[in-house]
């Protein structure tokens, strides 16, 4: 464990909380926008919504998730919490990585924008799949927030089978 000055640590914590909770807000915004695009009868409006989503992803989701990841790992490495020492920190790392992977491999606003070009209709199952993948990301980030506040004290070593 490398100790850092309390003031530096608090600044890091502020950046971590702001980035992580802002990420949750960004995903919530995308859930709302995708649900509206799925439910509307105005196909041109749905297309416009899908075209705007990458702006939220590139200006919000990607930088915020990277900032949350880097500051979270630094906070773990420079404290008694560690990164893989306590279940709540390791679980948050897994949840954030799963959120990033879901964003990379399941959420596809560019594909949806291309499919709805010229106000074309797409299968609603495809639209709901987008809402579902974002809903899972939202649930994972909410769980991470809960873990951060309750900090269950279980250590990772207690999960390993005794020899
Ligand atoms: C998934 C998104 C995340 C959210 C929503 C989140 C949220 C938070 C919040 C609200 C706190 C403040 C808790 C408090 O001071 O009582 C916190 C602290 C912390 N987070 Fe995260 N976090 C996330 C990801 C991560 C990741 C990926 C790591 C490390 C791998 C991490 C490591 C930590 C550590 C070590 C602290 C404790 C700092 C301290 O009290 O000294 N977090 N997090």
Image (tube, rainbow, N blue to C red):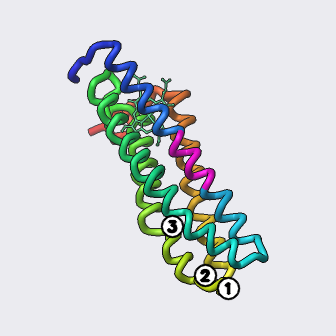
Q: Which residues are magenta?
A: 22-29
- Image position, residue 73 (x, y; %): 32, 36
- Residue located beneath label 3 in the image: 107
Q: CA distance from mark 1 to mark 3?
A: 19 Å
Question: Closest to the observer: 27 or 145?
Answer: 27
- Image position, residue 43 (x, y; %): 71, 78
Q: Which of the two discs, 2 and 1, labels the residue nearer the N terminus?
A: 2
Q: Which of the two discs, 3 and 2, labels the residue nearer the N terminus?
A: 3
Magenta stretch: dominant secondary structure? helix
As helix, strand or loop, the secondary structure at mark 2 comes to loop
Which picture quadrant has residue 12? top left
Report if the CB atoms under discs 2 and 1 are less than 8 Å apart.
Answer: yes
User: In this rendering, is residue 30 above or below 46?
Assistant: above
Question: Closest to the observer: 82 or 125?
Answer: 125
Residue 27 belongs to the span the image colors magenta: yes
Q: CA distance from mark 3 to mark 2?
A: 15 Å
As helix, strand or loop, the secondary structure at mark 3 comes to loop
- Residue located beneath label 2 in the image: 116
- Image position, residue 95 (x, y; %): 45, 48
Could you classify mark 1 by the number of other residues whose Cα lies within 10 Å: few (under 14), some (14-19), or many (20 or more)? some
Residue 121, numbered circle: 1
Q: Which of the two discs, 1 and 3, labels the residue nearer the N terminus?
A: 3
């Amino acid at each position: 464990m490398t100790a850092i000055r309390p003031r530096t640590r608090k600044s890091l914590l502020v950046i971590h909380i702001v980035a992580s909770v802002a990420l949750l807000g960004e995903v919530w915004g995308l859930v709302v926008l995708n649900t509206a695009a799925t439910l509307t009868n105005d196909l041109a409006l749905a297309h416009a919504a899908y075209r705007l989503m990458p702006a939220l992803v590139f200006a919000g989701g990607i930088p915020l998730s990277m900032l949350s990841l880097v500051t979270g790992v630094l906070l773990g490495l420079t404290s008694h919490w560690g990164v893989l020492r306590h279940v709540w920190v390791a679980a948050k790392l897994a949840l954030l990585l799963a959120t990033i992977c879901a964003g990379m491999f399941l959420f596809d606003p560019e594909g949806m924008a291309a499919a709805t070009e010229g106000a074309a209709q797409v299968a609603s199952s495809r639209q709901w799949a987008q809402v579902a993948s974002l809903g899972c990301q939202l649930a994972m980030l909410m769980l991470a927030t809960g873990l951060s506040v309750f900090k269950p004290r279980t250590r990772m070593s207690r999960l390993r089978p005794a020899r």
